[in-house]
Image (cartoon, rainbow, N blue to C red):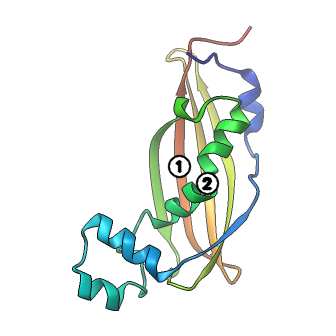
Amino acid sequence: MVRFNSRWLALEGHEFPAFQARIERDRVVRYLDFLGQQDAEVRQESACDDIGPALPTFPFSLEMEAGVVAAVAALLEIEASRLLHAEQSFTYHRPLRCGDLVTVMSWLRDVTWKPERRVCFFVKESHFRVDGRLTVSSRSVYAIRTAGEDT
């Protein structure tokens, strides 16, 4: 089991490198197919309309592909398998559509150590921008259960 590292508390506010991802029709269609949300004919016709309501977690898949979870683990100097993805929420400010070039900026908003439970929580916030305008914001909470405090 991982030991709590007091250095983690100083990581609050850490900004991860920004990255860009283009939303492509094939990716959206595959995502809809995986979720079983639409039949093939409807999916092909409407897949690139406002995809927010149909794909609330789609932005997270962009982060996963870019290796954000691995980056969090590397920052904490632990194995990614030690991170528990505890909670996630999304707010859609504007439609997200096929063809959009999305710029993603993420940072650790909050780091909280709960010594009585030996759990450390990391709140990561991300902003997804298209043409410089905020399109989606997300909040992800990761947790690490520890063996205790570092010495």
Instruction: Report crowding for label 2: few under 14, some 14 to 19, many 20 or more residues within 10 A (C-alpha).
Output: many
In the image shown, does 47 or 15 lie closer to the viewer? 47
Q: Name the residue under label 1.
A: 140
The structure residue drawn at horizontal position 52% and vertical position 76%, both measured from the top left corner, is 93
The structure residue drawn at horizontal position 58% and vertical position 35%, both measured from the top left corner, is 80
Q: Which mark is residue 85?
A: none
SS class, disc 2: strand
In the image shown, does 48 or 11 lie closer to the viewer? 48
User: Which amino acid is tagged 1?
Assistant: Ser
- For the image, the number of numbered tags is 2
Q: Do the residues labelled 1 and 2 touch (CB within 8 Å)?
A: yes
Question: How far from the left and from the top, in percent, is residue 28?
Answer: 42, 75
Q: Earlier in the sequence, mark 1 or mark 2?
A: 2
The structure residue drawn at horizontal position 47% and vertical position 62%, both measured from the top left corner, is 90
Q: Is residue 38 left or right of residue 87?
A: left
SS class, disc 1: strand
User: Which amino acid is tagged 2?
Assistant: Glu
Q: Residue 125 carries which label?
A: 2
State the residue lying farthest toward the bottom. 45
Question: How far from the left and from the top, in percent, is residue 73?
Answer: 64, 37
Question: How far from the left and from the top, in percent, is residue 39?
Answer: 21, 80
145 relative to 67, above or below: above
Alpha-carbon distance for marks 1 and 2?
6 Å
122 relative to 129, above or below: above
The quadrant in which the N terminus is found is top right
In the image shown, does 58 or 127 lie closer to the viewer? 58
Question: How far from the left and from the top, in percent, is residue 29?
Answer: 38, 77
6 relative to 47, above or below: above
Instruction: Report crowding for label 1: few under 14, some 14 to 19, many 20 or more residues within 10 A (C-alpha).
Output: some
